[in-house]
Image (spheres, grey):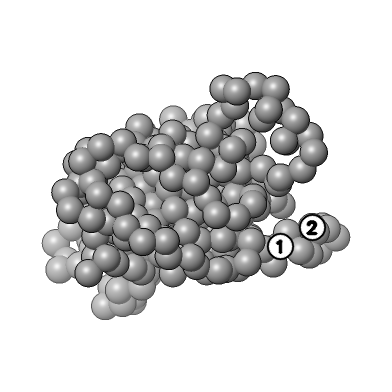
Amino acid sequence: MTRIQEAYVRKVVDTVSDLDNVLYEVSNESNTDSQSWQYHLIRYIKSYEASRAAPHPVGMTVVSPDGSNDSVFGSAADWVSPNADGGYADSPPAAPGGKVMLTDTDHLWGIGGDRAWAWKSFTRGLNVLYMDPWDAQVIDVAANSDLRINMGYIRFYARRMNLATMKPSPRLASTSYCLADPGSAYLVYLPGVEDGIHTRFVARLFKWASPWMSRRVDVDLSAASGTLAIEWFNPRTGDILRTGGVKGGARERFAAPFRGDAVLYLSRSAHR
């Protein structure tokens, strides 16, 4: 059976080898005993393509149910898609490098995700994927549209940056959600909370309230020289507000000019 499967793989590879928009995946959410089989086929595809001018990325998604993310991280795959273990659904860990990380709402929730998850994931160096609800499943229409729209906003910023030089840099921002090319560009997410009576009461009661509660963020610009342009983006409305520049060389505090969550973009290129 394995030899038959390998023959099929060779046929697929030979057929689409001239296309540059192909990603290989052995099996989506395959059963738990499939790990060694998937490992074999991942290695087989990579070996078969090794002599080609442009090998294609080969991926592995976590097995289901009760899969371990260690199994995908320890594979020979070029890209992987984990489940929610380790915080990928709420406070995603920074991408460690070495593999492209695809965080898919299907593998995290089945049905779920919101704009905060998308921005947190992107600023931690992860690639976000969204799966629409399926038959007989219900999701809030407004939340569904909001997530879709914000994935478009994320793409807008991704195209403005040199992603090859941007790395997740949690230590550079007090919110810890920061994608940066230190000295050149910083994309920071402030999760925020809606400003209401309860929020204001807590902020006044506890002077040490965290930066996300006061809509402020400290960013370490020690590696930057010259002036960086300050740009605020409102993920609720899509509005952009440019508020001048800031000199690099030190840690600076920034305050979002609107309520709720916010995105801060600091860039030398935007200032020119």
Q: Amino acid at mark 1?
A: Asn
> In the figure, residue 202 lies in which quadrant?
top right
**Is residue 15 in view?**
yes
23 and 188: which one is in front?
188
Which residue in the protein does label 1 denote?
144
Dot 2: what SS? loop
> Which residue is depicted at the point 64% across and 61% down?
236
Left or right position of 50 against 86: left
Left or right position of 192 against 156: right
x%, y% of residue 118? 55, 52
Q: Amino acid at mark 2?
A: Ile
x%, y% of residue 136? 85, 60
- Categorize mark 2 by other alpha carbons within 10 Å: few (<14), some (14-19), many (20+): few
> Which residue is depicted at the point 60% across and 55% down?
258
> Which residue is depicted at the point 67% across and 43% down?
193
Q: CA distance from mark 1 to mark 2?
A: 7 Å
- Categorize mark 1 by other alpha carbons within 10 Å: few (<14), some (14-19), many (20+): some
Which residue in the protein does label 2 denote?
139
**Is residue 1 in view?**
no
| Residues tagged 1 and 2 counted as in contact (Cβ below 8 A) | yes
Q: Which mark is residue 254?
A: none
49 and 95: which one is in front?
95
> Which residue is depicted at the point 56% across and 60% down?
234
